[in-house]
Image (cartoon, rainbow, N blue to C red):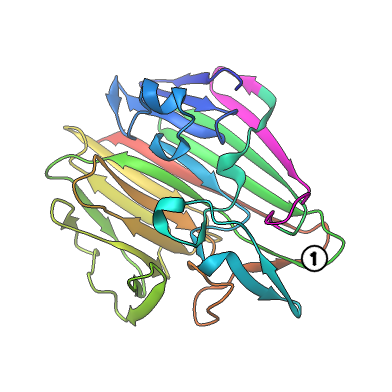
Amino acid sequence: MSDPISLAAGALRAVIAPGLGASILSFTHAGGDILRPATPAALAGGQVRLTGGYPMLPFANRIADGRFLFAGRWHRIRPNFPDLGPHALHGSGWQRAWTLVESGPAHLSLTLAHIPAAEGDWPFAFTAGLEYRLTPAGLDVGMRLVNDSAGMAPAGMGLHPNFRRVPGAMLRFSALSHWRPGPDGLPASVSMPPDPDFRHGRLLDDSVLDGDFPGWAGIAHVTGLAPGLLVSLRADRLFGTLRVFTPTARDFFGLEPVTHGANAINQPELPPMAILAPGAALSGTISILAEPI
Protein backbone atom coordinates (compact mmCIF):
# COMPACT_ATOMS: atom_id res chain seq x y z
CA MET A 1 0.00 0.00 0.00
CA SER A 2 1.30 3.46 -0.86
CA ASP A 3 2.03 5.84 1.99
CA PRO A 4 -0.77 8.09 3.25
CA ILE A 5 -0.61 11.75 2.20
CA SER A 6 -1.17 14.61 4.64
CA LEU A 7 -2.88 17.87 3.65
CA ALA A 8 -3.00 21.11 5.64
CA ALA A 9 -4.83 24.44 5.31
CA GLY A 10 -5.44 26.85 8.18
CA ALA A 11 -6.71 24.92 11.21
CA LEU A 12 -7.71 21.92 9.10
CA ARG A 13 -5.75 18.73 8.49
CA ALA A 14 -6.60 15.67 6.39
CA VAL A 15 -4.81 12.40 5.70
CA ILE A 16 -5.66 10.43 2.55
CA ALA A 17 -4.66 6.82 1.76
CA PRO A 18 -4.54 6.31 -2.03
CA GLY A 19 -3.62 2.64 -1.62
CA LEU A 20 -6.51 1.94 0.76
CA GLY A 21 -9.48 2.72 -1.47
CA ALA A 22 -8.57 6.44 -1.64
CA SER A 23 -10.03 6.62 1.87
CA ILE A 24 -9.90 9.53 4.31
CA LEU A 25 -7.91 8.38 7.34
CA SER A 26 -8.57 11.54 9.33
CA PHE A 27 -10.05 15.01 9.02
CA THR A 28 -9.52 17.40 11.93
CA HIS A 29 -10.09 21.02 12.97
CA ALA A 30 -7.55 22.44 15.44
CA GLY A 31 -6.64 18.87 16.38
CA GLY A 32 -10.23 17.74 17.01
CA ASP A 33 -11.70 14.94 14.92
CA ILE A 34 -14.58 15.74 12.57
CA LEU A 35 -14.62 12.35 10.85
CA ARG A 36 -14.01 9.11 12.73
CA PRO A 37 -10.22 8.54 12.64
CA ALA A 38 -8.90 5.25 11.33
CA THR A 39 -7.21 3.19 14.06
CA PRO A 40 -3.81 1.52 13.62
CA ALA A 41 -5.60 -1.85 13.70
CA ALA A 42 -7.91 -0.74 10.87
CA LEU A 43 -4.91 0.32 8.80
CA ALA A 44 -2.99 -2.85 9.52
CA GLY A 45 -5.99 -4.94 8.46
CA GLY A 46 -6.82 -2.84 5.40
CA GLN A 47 -10.30 -2.11 6.81
CA VAL A 48 -11.56 0.69 4.57
CA ARG A 49 -14.97 0.58 6.26
CA LEU A 50 -13.31 1.63 9.54
CA THR A 51 -11.80 4.81 8.12
CA GLY A 52 -13.21 8.33 8.08
CA GLY A 53 -14.74 7.87 4.64
CA TYR A 54 -14.31 6.61 1.10
CA PRO A 55 -15.64 7.06 -2.45
CA MET A 56 -18.45 4.93 -3.83
CA LEU A 57 -18.36 4.14 -7.56
CA PRO A 58 -19.38 2.97 -10.17
CA PHE A 59 -22.53 2.66 -8.04
CA ALA A 60 -23.55 3.64 -4.53
CA ASN A 61 -25.18 1.54 -1.84
CA ARG A 62 -26.94 -1.74 -2.64
CA ILE A 63 -27.54 -3.80 -5.74
CA ALA A 64 -29.91 -6.57 -4.65
CA ASP A 65 -28.22 -9.97 -4.73
CA GLY A 66 -25.52 -8.41 -6.95
CA ARG A 67 -27.82 -8.99 -9.94
CA PHE A 68 -29.39 -6.63 -12.47
CA LEU A 69 -30.81 -6.48 -16.00
CA PHE A 70 -29.35 -3.93 -18.41
CA ALA A 71 -29.89 -3.63 -22.17
CA GLY A 72 -31.60 -7.02 -22.31
CA ARG A 73 -28.86 -8.91 -20.50
CA TRP A 74 -28.59 -10.13 -16.92
CA HIS A 75 -25.39 -9.30 -15.05
CA ARG A 76 -24.16 -10.63 -11.74
CA ILE A 77 -21.47 -9.04 -9.59
CA ARG A 78 -19.95 -10.62 -6.52
CA PRO A 79 -21.22 -9.67 -3.03
CA ASN A 80 -18.61 -7.65 -1.15
CA PHE A 81 -20.18 -7.16 2.31
CA PRO A 82 -20.42 -10.75 3.65
CA ASP A 83 -21.81 -9.60 7.01
CA LEU A 84 -24.71 -7.82 5.28
CA GLY A 85 -26.01 -10.64 3.13
CA PRO A 86 -25.93 -11.32 -0.60
CA HIS A 87 -26.02 -7.75 -1.89
CA ALA A 88 -23.21 -5.86 -3.61
CA LEU A 89 -22.50 -2.51 -1.91
CA HIS A 90 -20.77 0.76 -2.71
CA GLY A 91 -19.12 -0.29 -5.96
CA SER A 92 -15.50 -1.36 -6.22
CA GLY A 93 -13.49 1.87 -5.95
CA TRP A 94 -13.20 1.59 -2.17
CA GLN A 95 -11.62 -1.87 -2.54
CA ARG A 96 -8.93 -0.81 -5.01
CA ALA A 97 -5.60 0.98 -4.79
CA TRP A 98 -5.69 4.32 -6.59
CA THR A 99 -2.79 5.86 -8.53
CA LEU A 100 -1.41 9.23 -7.46
CA VAL A 101 -1.39 11.76 -10.31
CA GLU A 102 -0.36 14.92 -8.49
CA SER A 103 -0.04 16.22 -4.93
CA GLY A 104 0.79 19.42 -3.08
CA PRO A 105 0.58 20.78 0.48
CA ALA A 106 -3.23 21.05 0.30
CA HIS A 107 -4.36 18.88 -2.60
CA LEU A 108 -3.91 15.61 -4.40
CA SER A 109 -5.44 13.98 -7.45
CA LEU A 110 -5.90 10.26 -8.00
CA THR A 111 -7.01 8.00 -10.81
CA LEU A 112 -8.37 4.47 -11.12
CA ALA A 113 -8.86 2.40 -14.28
CA HIS A 114 -11.25 -0.57 -14.35
CA ILE A 115 -11.38 -3.23 -17.05
CA PRO A 116 -13.59 -6.25 -16.23
CA ALA A 117 -11.38 -9.32 -16.19
CA ALA A 118 -13.17 -12.00 -14.18
CA GLU A 119 -16.63 -13.30 -13.46
CA GLY A 120 -18.26 -11.13 -10.83
CA ASP A 121 -16.43 -7.95 -11.83
CA TRP A 122 -18.44 -4.83 -12.64
CA PRO A 123 -19.07 -5.56 -16.32
CA PHE A 124 -18.40 -2.09 -17.76
CA ALA A 125 -14.97 -0.50 -18.18
CA PHE A 126 -14.47 2.94 -16.66
CA THR A 127 -11.86 5.44 -15.56
CA ALA A 128 -12.40 7.33 -12.32
CA GLY A 129 -10.73 10.42 -10.93
CA LEU A 130 -10.67 11.92 -7.44
CA GLU A 131 -9.37 15.27 -6.30
CA TYR A 132 -9.03 16.04 -2.62
CA ARG A 133 -8.50 19.75 -1.98
CA LEU A 134 -8.21 21.25 1.51
CA THR A 135 -8.96 24.93 2.12
CA PRO A 136 -9.17 26.84 5.41
CA ALA A 137 -12.96 26.30 5.21
CA GLY A 138 -13.14 22.59 4.48
CA LEU A 139 -12.35 19.54 2.38
CA ASP A 140 -13.53 19.49 -1.25
CA VAL A 141 -13.83 16.10 -2.95
CA GLY A 142 -14.09 16.24 -6.74
CA MET A 143 -15.31 13.02 -8.37
CA ARG A 144 -15.35 11.98 -12.03
CA LEU A 145 -16.37 8.75 -13.75
CA VAL A 146 -15.91 8.13 -17.50
CA ASN A 147 -17.52 5.25 -19.40
CA ASP A 148 -14.72 3.44 -21.26
CA SER A 149 -17.01 0.70 -22.59
CA ALA A 150 -17.86 0.32 -26.25
CA GLY A 151 -21.58 0.68 -25.46
CA MET A 152 -23.95 2.40 -23.05
CA ALA A 153 -23.31 1.74 -19.35
CA PRO A 154 -25.06 2.49 -16.05
CA ALA A 155 -23.07 4.68 -13.68
CA GLY A 156 -23.33 6.27 -10.26
CA MET A 157 -21.17 7.55 -7.47
CA GLY A 158 -21.11 9.13 -4.04
CA LEU A 159 -19.10 9.73 -0.90
CA HIS A 160 -19.37 7.80 2.37
CA PRO A 161 -18.02 10.09 5.12
CA ASN A 162 -18.19 8.63 8.63
CA PHE A 163 -18.69 11.51 11.05
CA ARG A 164 -17.62 11.23 14.66
CA ARG A 165 -20.74 10.61 16.75
CA VAL A 166 -20.99 12.44 20.06
CA PRO A 167 -23.89 12.99 22.51
CA GLY A 168 -25.96 16.03 21.64
CA ALA A 169 -25.04 16.21 17.94
CA MET A 170 -27.87 17.65 15.86
CA LEU A 171 -28.51 17.17 12.14
CA ARG A 172 -30.48 19.57 9.93
CA PHE A 173 -31.35 19.29 6.22
CA SER A 174 -34.36 19.30 3.91
CA ALA A 175 -35.52 16.72 1.38
CA LEU A 176 -38.66 15.78 -0.55
CA SER A 177 -39.10 12.20 0.65
CA HIS A 178 -37.64 9.33 2.67
CA TRP A 179 -37.29 5.72 1.54
CA ARG A 180 -37.17 3.30 4.47
CA PRO A 181 -35.53 -0.12 4.03
CA GLY A 182 -37.18 -3.47 4.57
CA PRO A 183 -35.62 -6.37 6.50
CA ASP A 184 -33.33 -7.11 3.54
CA GLY A 185 -31.93 -3.56 3.60
CA LEU A 186 -33.53 -2.61 0.28
CA PRO A 187 -35.89 0.38 -0.16
CA ALA A 188 -39.39 -0.76 0.81
CA SER A 189 -41.64 2.20 1.65
CA VAL A 190 -41.66 5.92 1.01
CA SER A 191 -42.96 8.88 3.02
CA MET A 192 -43.71 12.24 1.38
CA PRO A 193 -42.95 14.61 3.05
CA PRO A 194 -40.13 12.74 4.75
CA ASP A 195 -40.64 11.14 8.13
CA PRO A 196 -38.58 11.81 10.15
CA ASP A 197 -38.27 15.42 9.05
CA PHE A 198 -34.89 17.07 9.64
CA ARG A 199 -35.77 20.58 8.42
CA HIS A 200 -35.67 22.07 11.92
CA GLY A 201 -32.94 19.81 13.25
CA ARG A 202 -33.05 16.53 15.15
CA LEU A 203 -30.79 15.05 17.78
CA LEU A 204 -28.92 11.97 16.61
CA ASP A 205 -28.66 10.43 20.09
CA ASP A 206 -31.64 8.11 19.64
CA SER A 207 -31.95 8.05 15.85
CA VAL A 208 -31.62 4.71 14.06
CA LEU A 209 -31.76 5.23 10.30
CA ASP A 210 -30.38 3.60 7.16
CA GLY A 211 -32.38 5.12 4.33
CA ASP A 212 -32.38 7.46 1.35
CA PHE A 213 -33.70 11.04 1.31
CA PRO A 214 -34.30 11.92 -2.38
CA GLY A 215 -34.77 15.55 -3.34
CA TRP A 216 -32.12 16.60 -0.87
CA ALA A 217 -31.40 20.34 -1.12
CA GLY A 218 -27.65 19.77 -1.34
CA ILE A 219 -26.71 21.04 2.10
CA ALA A 220 -26.80 19.56 5.60
CA HIS A 221 -25.63 21.06 8.89
CA VAL A 222 -24.33 19.28 11.97
CA THR A 223 -23.85 21.06 15.28
CA GLY A 224 -22.48 19.67 18.52
CA LEU A 225 -19.48 17.77 17.09
CA ALA A 226 -17.17 20.34 18.70
CA PRO A 227 -17.86 23.49 20.75
CA GLY A 228 -18.35 26.55 18.58
CA LEU A 229 -18.00 24.63 15.31
CA LEU A 230 -20.55 24.26 12.50
CA VAL A 231 -19.93 21.26 10.26
CA SER A 232 -21.70 21.37 6.90
CA LEU A 233 -21.99 18.95 4.02
CA ARG A 234 -22.53 20.46 0.57
CA ALA A 235 -22.86 18.73 -2.77
CA ASP A 236 -23.47 19.61 -6.40
CA ARG A 237 -26.98 19.02 -7.75
CA LEU A 238 -25.77 15.79 -9.36
CA PHE A 239 -25.81 14.23 -5.88
CA GLY A 240 -29.56 14.58 -5.46
CA THR A 241 -30.08 11.96 -2.76
CA LEU A 242 -28.71 11.94 0.79
CA ARG A 243 -28.40 8.62 2.57
CA VAL A 244 -28.47 8.87 6.36
CA PHE A 245 -26.93 6.01 8.33
CA THR A 246 -27.11 6.24 12.13
CA PRO A 247 -26.40 2.74 13.50
CA THR A 248 -27.00 1.93 17.15
CA ALA A 249 -24.14 1.84 19.66
CA ARG A 250 -21.53 2.93 17.12
CA ASP A 251 -19.00 5.76 17.26
CA PHE A 252 -19.97 7.27 13.89
CA PHE A 253 -22.85 8.24 11.63
CA GLY A 254 -22.90 8.46 7.85
CA LEU A 255 -24.21 11.26 5.63
CA GLU A 256 -23.76 10.03 2.07
CA PRO A 257 -24.42 12.27 -0.94
CA VAL A 258 -25.18 9.95 -3.87
CA THR A 259 -26.31 10.28 -7.48
CA HIS A 260 -29.06 7.65 -7.27
CA GLY A 261 -31.17 5.59 -4.91
CA ALA A 262 -30.08 2.31 -3.36
CA ASN A 263 -30.84 -0.59 -5.74
CA ALA A 264 -32.14 1.92 -8.28
CA ILE A 265 -30.92 -0.26 -11.13
CA ASN A 266 -33.56 -2.84 -10.06
CA GLN A 267 -36.25 -0.48 -8.72
CA PRO A 268 -37.37 2.06 -11.33
CA GLU A 269 -39.44 4.01 -8.78
CA LEU A 270 -36.20 5.29 -7.19
CA PRO A 271 -33.90 8.12 -8.37
CA PRO A 272 -32.12 6.37 -11.27
CA MET A 273 -28.52 5.69 -12.10
CA ALA A 274 -27.12 7.65 -15.05
CA ILE A 275 -26.77 5.92 -18.41
CA LEU A 276 -23.53 7.02 -20.05
CA ALA A 277 -22.65 6.83 -23.72
CA PRO A 278 -19.12 5.70 -24.58
CA GLY A 279 -16.70 8.42 -23.48
CA ALA A 280 -19.34 10.32 -21.50
CA ALA A 281 -18.72 11.28 -17.88
CA LEU A 282 -20.31 12.04 -14.52
CA SER A 283 -18.54 14.70 -12.49
CA GLY A 284 -19.28 16.72 -9.37
CA THR A 285 -17.95 17.98 -6.06
CA ILE A 286 -18.84 17.25 -2.45
CA SER A 287 -17.53 19.46 0.37
CA ILE A 288 -17.21 18.89 4.11
CA LEU A 289 -16.97 22.32 5.72
CA ALA A 290 -15.89 23.12 9.28
CA GLU A 291 -16.33 26.74 10.30
CA PRO A 292 -16.50 28.58 13.63
CA ILE A 293 -20.00 29.64 14.58
Residue 60, percent from left and from top? 53, 57
Residue 40 sits in quarter: top left
Asked if residue 51 is among those painted magenta in the image, a careful observer would answer no
Vertical arrangement, residue 99 with respect to residue 178, above or below: above
**Which region is colored magenta?**
103-122
> Which residue occupies 56% across, 36% down?
21
Camera-nearest residue between 143 and 293: 143
Residue 48, percent from left and from top? 47, 36
Camera-nearest residue between 89 and 244: 89
Q: Secondary structure at mark 1?
A: loop
Camera-nearest residue between 88 and 207: 88
Q: Residue furthest right?
A: 150
Q: Which part of the image, by quadrant, shows the C terminus?
A: top left
Vertical arrangement, residue 116 with respect to residue 32, above or below: below
Q: Which part of the image, by quadrant, shows the N terminus?
A: top right
The residue tagged 1 is 277
Asked if residue 112 is among those painted magenta in the image, a careful observer would answer yes
> Which residue occupies 38% across, 28% down?
38
